[in-house]
DNA sequence: CGAGTTTGACCTGCGC
DNA sequence: GCGCAGGTCAAACTCG
């Protein structure tokens, strides 16, 4: 069998990437105004960005070190230079999103595709009993497909990550179940499922066709198990000392359900982006959507997209970086 | 040997 | 109805 280069394993030698880190919130306009839109993604707020490099430090750690000058922080950053959050409220009927976008082939494209395929039936791969029987009695050419009625898609949200790493380690364990070439893109899209039993969370990973340095990671669904679930997950959000990042970097992206279950609510981290966000169609006005998620102290690591109005203003580096990033990205967005 | 990946085939929805 | 494209399946394969 012909093997393609496994980019997902090329997590090393990315240290030459510019170490600016942005967590932006670009969102197709079609979502920004729909029913709370983006900010209602899975129960509200997201734990995220406990980005750990091989040294075990995270972005949160990094940016919260007041005694580091920006240059020092940059030097310490892992090889992810830009992280962009995109919403996909696929459960919500949407209008055309063609008017938006940071890239016609990227976020908006994803959302368009999601809208088109919203009614794609999801196989119930959790019904092991049936599957076992089918496995033993059917061939590939006689594969019976389950006919499910149209179902609602799980909420989706996408990260755009400027990195050489194709598959960011978010702490969960994923099994790749497919890969497809994407039209108008030289880069394939890979499909992953959470390996946890009874957890149907899916993740898609693809590179932007416009900017190959950008990896678009789209999550769908909510983890039904505590985080971390696996040995890899030992790098967990609250575990700052372990260093099992899988040889590369890691995103922790814990669902709110378990945040409340296992941790104290946390202060949103990337909140100092009000100006940029609003200019990109990111709805920063509904901060009250999830009040429980941003009324808590520091040293916590949560990105809470719904709480933009409570932005902290003292993450100097990040703010600078975001400004820089958007200044650089904006012309491209407008071109497309 | 179990877990994860690869990859061609298949299914489904949508646009024409 | 047909073709296209996205999404998924599952056998074969690799890897630790």
Image: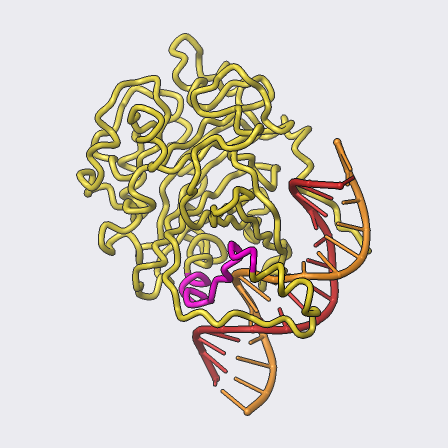
Chain colours: A yellow, B red, C orange
Residue drawn at the location 55% of the way across and 47% of the way down = A211
- In the figure, A268 relative to A327: above or below? above
Residue A239: % across, % down: 47, 19
Q: Is residue A121 shown left or right of residue A27? A: right
Q: Nearer the viewer, residue A58 or A26?
A: A58
Residue A200: % across, % down: 47, 50
- In the figure, A103 relative to A82: above or below? below
Q: Nearer the viewer, residue A188 or C16?
A: C16
Q: Is residue A334 shown left or right of residue A128? A: left
- For the record, the magenta segment spans A112-129
Asked if residue A102 can be seen in this view, the reply is: yes
Residue A1: % across, % down: 82, 56
Residue A242: image quadrant is: top right
Where is the C terminus of chain A found, in terms of image quarters? bottom left
Residue A115 lies in the magenta-colored region: yes
- In the figure, A61 relative to A120: above or below? above
**Furthest-left residue in view?**
A288
Asked if residue A270 can be seen in this view, the reply is: no
Q: Is residue A165 shown left or right of residue A60? A: right
Residue A175 lies in the magenta-colored region: no
Residue A299: image quadrant is: top left
Residue drawn at the location 48% of the way across and 47% of the way down = A198
């Amino acid at each position: 069998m012909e093997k393609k280069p496994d980019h997902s394993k090329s997590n090393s030698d990315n240290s030459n990437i510019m170490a600016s880190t942005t967590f932006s919130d670009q969102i197709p306009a079609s979502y920004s105004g729909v029913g709370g839109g983006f900010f209602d993604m899975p129960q509200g707020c997201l734990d995220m960005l406990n980005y750990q490099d091989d040294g075990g430090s995270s972005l949160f750690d990094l940016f919260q070190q007041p005694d580091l000058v920006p240059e020092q922080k940059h030097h310490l950053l892992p090889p992810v230079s830009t992280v962009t959050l995109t919403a996909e409220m696929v459960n919500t009927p949407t209008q055309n999103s063609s008017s938006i976008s940071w890239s016609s082939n990227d976020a908006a494209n994803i959302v368009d595709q999601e809208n088109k395929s919203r009614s794609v039936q999801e196989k119930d791969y959790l019904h092991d009993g049936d599957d076992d029987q089918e496995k033993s009695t059917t061939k590939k050419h006689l594969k019976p497909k389950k006919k499910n009625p149209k179902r609602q898609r799980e909420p989706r949200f996408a990260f755009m990550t400027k990195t050489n790493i194709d598959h960011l380690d978010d702490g969960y364990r994923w099994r790749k179940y497919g890969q497809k070439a994407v039209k108008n893109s030289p880069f394939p899209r890979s499909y992953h499922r959470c390996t946890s039993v009874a957890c149907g969370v899916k993740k898609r990973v693809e590179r932007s066709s416009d900017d190959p340095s950008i990896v678009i990671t789209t999550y769908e669904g909510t983890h039904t198990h505590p985080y971390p679930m696996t040995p890899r997950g030992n790098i967990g959000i609250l575990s700052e000392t372990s260093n099992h990042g899988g040889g590369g970097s890691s995103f922790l992206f814990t669902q709110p359900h378990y945040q409340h279950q296992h941790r104290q609510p946390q202060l949103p981290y990337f909140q100092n982006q009000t100006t940029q966000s609003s200019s990109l169609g990111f709805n920063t006005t509904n901060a009250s959507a999830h009040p429980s998620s941003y009324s808590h102290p520091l040293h916590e690591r949560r990105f809470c997209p719904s709480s933009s109005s409570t932005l902290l203003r003292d993450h100097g580096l990040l703010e600078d970086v975001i400004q820089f990033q958007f200044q650089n990205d904006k012309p491209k967005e407008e071109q497309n």
